[in-house]
Image (spheres, rainbow, N blue to C red):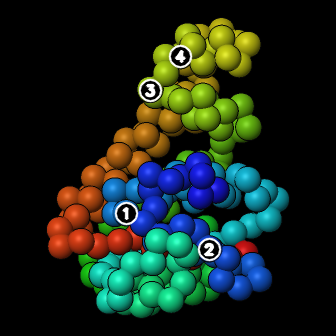
Amino acid sequence: MNERFTHSYVSPFTITHGDEMQGLLRISADFWGIACFLRDALEPVRIRVGIGVGALATDVRTDASIGMDGPVWHLAKNAIDHAHAERKFMLAATGDGNVDTVVNGIIGALARIRDDWTDRQKKIIDCGWPNVTQERIAEQLGVTQVNISKMVGRAKLDIYVDLCAALQCYLSDKYEFPRRYNQIRLYN
């Protein structure tokens, strides 16, 4: 996990309790992609993800995501508690209700789109769409480009990719300076 997302974290993912882990991510990290990777890897176990966006009050530990404190950790705990109570895959908390409404609305839309995907449609994303051509993906999956085009349309992959980009841009633009962090907490 940490090897795959080395570019995304400031402090690596660390198991904190029996079935919980957390990591301190750069604000520019693709937290949605990381959470979906975990969700897919741990299926059929259902996980909950809480994202806190905020400041860190202590020094960063680069060896493990423990022993640090600040609003980012408390916001993440709040988000995971609400995700659990509301039976949602993921929620975020920034300390700004309006921002939380926008971010969690996008997260909810992404989750609903993704929940409807078939395994084959998930593989299109795994093959690198939209950065890889449909022809190349068709080769990799052993189908025609027309089939890939139909699966992209049915899966709403173009909308999904646009929402991912909007979420990332919104948070990066809003929170990059002063330095803010995403903190991911997971448990099932």
Q: In this view, does 16 lie to the left or right of 174?
A: right
Residue topped by disc 1: 26
Q: Measured along the vertical axis of the image, is residue 22 above or below residue 120?
A: below
Seen from the viewer's position, the closer of residues 115 and 80 is 80
Where residue 163 sits: x, y (%)? 39, 48
Q: What residue type is labelled 4?
A: Gln
104 sits to left or right of 111: left
Mark 1 or mark 4, which has the lower sequence index?
1
Q: How crowded is mark 1: few (under 14 residues within 10 Å), some or many (20 or more)?
A: many
Q: Estimate the x, y position of residue 118 in percent, counting from the top left.
A: 71, 38
| Amino acid at pointer 1 | Arg
Question: What residue does disc 2 label?
Answer: 14
Q: Gap between marks 3 and 1, in whole Å?
A: 23 Å
Q: Residues within 10 Å of mark 4 (few under 14, many from 20)?
A: many
Q: Which of marks 3 and 1 is nearer the N terminus?
A: 1
CA distance for labels 3 and 4: 9 Å
Describe the element under mark 2 as helix, strand or loop. strand
The residue wearing badge 3 is 131
State the mark number for residue 134: 4
